[in-house]
Image: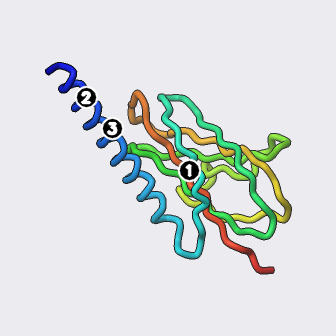
Amino acid sequence: MIKRFILFFCFISILVESFSQVQSRSDCEKLITPAYYYNDQDYLVKISQNEKASFHVTFYENFQYRLVACNKLKNSRVEVTLIDPNNNILYSNIDYDYTQVWDFQFTSTIECVVKMAVVGNEKFDKTELSLLVGYKSFSK
């Protein structure tokens, strides 16, 4: 009986967690307009208070990109910083009131690091951050 209860509880926990991930991703995907293709790469991480997440992303020339940053906290925002291989900050949404969406392009292929952190006074143990990268061909 106890084993059945534990299995049932695990099954319900997995369903709830799966639904919440899909909802979070779904909300982010709405910000990638039909003009952008979503690259299906999962940049998803659970972080604790005062932690930062880092993702390595390659951006190719002749494409226009849209970054979308999301979190599950209602009263906090996500800080996003794009850093080049020489450790130069190319973009920080701090300068733009922590906007969730940023459109940009590069003139050559480059691998960057995208760093993300939760900003705000909301207290939490763990939260989920997600980064979506949309792209489309850039016509000169």
Who comes first in sequence, dot 3 or dot 2? 2
Q: Closer to the camera: disc 1 or disc 3?
A: 3
Kind of residue indicated by mark 1: Leu
Which type of secondary structure does the marked residue at label 1 adopt?
strand
Determine whether, in the image, residue 81 is placed left or right of residue 71: right
Determine whether, in the image, residue 116 is placed left or right of residue 138: left
Kind of residue indicated by mark 2: Leu
Determine whether, in the image, residue 43 is placed left or right of residue 121: right
In the foreground, 90 or 95: 90
Which type of secondary structure does the marked residue at label 3 adopt?
helix
- List x then y, in percent, for residue 90: 75, 51
Residue neighbourhood size for the residue with mark 2, other residues' Cα within 10 Å, grouped as few (<14), some (14–19), many (≥20): few
Q: How many marks?
A: 3
Q: CA distance from mark 1 to mark 3?
A: 22 Å
Kind of residue indicated by mark 3: Ile
> In the rendered structure, are the residues bearing label 1 and label 3 in contact, judged by CB atoms less than 8 Å apart?
no
- List x then y, in percent, for residue 136: 67, 71
- List x then y, in percent, for residue 86: 85, 42
- List x then y, in percent, for residue 112: 75, 47
Residue neighbourhood size for the residue with mark 1, other residues' Cα within 10 Å, grouped as few (<14), some (14–19), many (≥20): many
Residue under label 1, please give it. 131
Q: Is residue 97 visible?
A: no
Residue under label 3, please give it. 14
